[in-house]
Image (cartoon, rainbow, N blue to C red):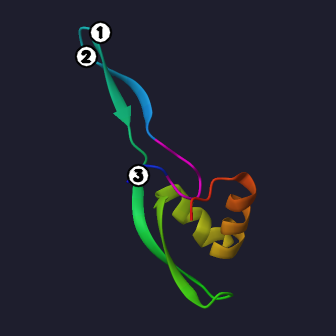
Amino acid sequence: MSRVCEITGKRPRVGNNVSHANNKTKRKFYPNLQKKRFYIPEEDKWITLKVSTSAIRTINKNGISAVLKKARENGNILV
């Protein structure tokens, strides 16, 4: 499975490890993804999403229905 948030579209970014001697080697910065179940009362069902922790905070603030609607409009939703 890919390491991509299904709501925000966050994915791994590429950067450098920088040593004390300023040597640089490539590395990846991974988003903090969690598998989480959400209940959608309008459809009376549970869905499982792989979301970043910032997306979980957004869902807690705005509600799952509003966040899913906005994600579909932006084209981020993979479900």
- Comes first in the chain, label 3 or label 2: 2
Is 63 part of what is drawn in magenta?
no
Q: Quadrant of residue 29?
A: top left
* Amino acid marked by disc 1: Asn
- Characterize the magenta stretch by its predominant secondary structure: loop
- Inter-mark Cα distance, 1 to 3: 27 Å
Task: Return the x and y of residue 48 as percentages of the image width and height.
Answer: 47, 73
* Residue underneath mark 1: 22
Q: Quadrant of the N terminus?
A: bottom left
**Which one is in front, 35 or 17?**
35
Q: To which residue does mark 3 refer?
A: 32
Q: Is residue 34 above or below residue 3?
A: below
The residue carrying mark 2 is: 19
Which is nearer the N-term, disc 1 or disc 3? 1
Horizontal placement of 54 versus 17: left or right? right
Place of residue 51 in the rendered image (x, y in percent of width and height, measured from the top left) = 49, 60
Residue 78, x across and y down, in percent = 57, 59
Q: Are marks 2 and 1 in contact (CB under 8 Å)?
A: yes
Residue 34 rendering spot, x and y as whole percentages: 40, 62
Residue 10 lies within the magenta run = yes
Which is nearer the eye, 23 or 38?
Answer: 38
Mark 3 lies on a secondary structure that is: loop
